[in-house]
Amino acid sequence: MRKLITITLIGLTSYFSYGQIELKPDFDKTVKFLQSEDYSKAQKEFSDLLSKATDNKLKKYCLIYRAFSYNGLGNYKMAIADLNEAIKLDPLDIASYTDLGKAKGFANDLDGAKQDFEYVLTKDSIGKQAQAALYYLGKIAYQNQQFEQSIKYYDKYILLTPNDPEVYFNRAAAKDMIMDPVGSIKDYDKAIQLDPNYKEAYANRGVAKINLLRRNGNLFPTKEQAMDACADLKKAKQLGDNTVDDMIFIHCDKK
């Protein structure tokens, strides 16, 4: 879902079979700068390629990749400008709207990002771009404290891609925020089933289990009652999550 750069690379590689073939070595070299996260060098080289490109398809891809380079540099304003130009050259490429929404999200323009992702969903309801749009709309809704709406986006995403542990984790976190520990525990269960080393899921599931005990009127669960929750907290600690130290001290290390 989030490997959109790779998808674009495949498309342009085939393009060079009939496009500006003389620029292919320079393009391939510049792509390697981007892949190795040398964003400054990539940005400069894609700018140089743009000065030589005469074909609109080549210009589009150079703009998209330069936008990725700007994203890596934290220059989201320039990334957004490049993606807008790429869309002008090819308004039917839905992936560019996804990339534009992501750049706006990085720039904290959540309303603008939401509009782009919602537009993507009008053009793609089940494919990779739809999955990306639903994922980011879920994150935006969560950041806006619209937790029930966030859950609805993740519900739709999971129908399309049922084996992504991160999205079960994200949906569980939203359920935590609406005080649904039973629902969140089920989602953390699924995230851990898909990724047995998901330390954050163990940590959050342990906390959710403590909250479930408290919700049932047990404000100070005994060490025995918290045993299951403590197993999760200690597993998270074992996997390297030190944020659980206080919870372990309070609920698991009592005499």
Image (cartoon, helix red, strand yellow):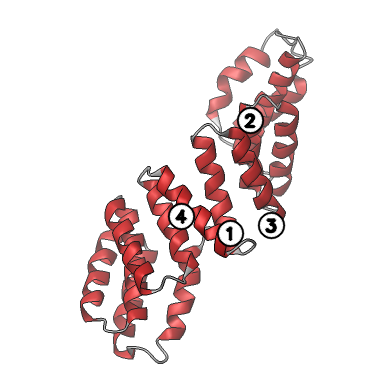
Amino acid found under the numbered disc labelled 1? Ala
**Is there a contact, CB below 8 Å, between mark 3 and mark 2?**
no
State which quadrant residue 45 falls in.
Answer: bottom left
Name the N-terminal-most of marks 1 and 3. Answer: 1
Q: Where is residue 149 shown, x and y percent of the image?
A: 60, 38
**Is there a contact, CB below 8 Å, between mark 1 and mark 2?**
no
Amino acid found under the numbered disc labelled 4? Asp
Label 2 element class: helix
Task: Write down the residue under mark 4.
Answer: 116
Label 4 element class: helix
Name the N-terminal-most of marks 1 and 2. Answer: 1
- Say which quadrant the C terminus sits in: top right
Task: Write down the residue under mark 2.
Answer: 204
Amino acid found under the numbered disc labelled 3? Leu
> Compared to 58, does 155 lie above or below?
above
Name the N-terminal-most of marks 4 and 1. Answer: 4
Q: Residues within 10 Å of mark 3 (few under 14, many from 20)?
A: some
> Compared to 14, does 66 lie above or below?
above
Task: Write down the residue under mark 3.
Answer: 160
State which quadrant residue 51 falls in.
Answer: bottom left
Query: Cα distance, mark 4 to mark 1?
Result: 11 Å
Query: Cα distance, mark 3 to mark 2?
Result: 25 Å
Q: Where is residue 3 shown, x and y percent of the image?
A: 51, 62
Task: Write down the residue under mark 1.
Answer: 130
State which quadrant residue 13 falls in.
Answer: bottom left
Amino acid found under the numbered disc labelled 2? Asn
**Is there a contact, CB below 8 Å, between mark 1 and mark 3?**
yes
Name the N-terminal-most of marks 2 and 4. Answer: 4
Name the N-terminal-most of marks 3 and 4. Answer: 4
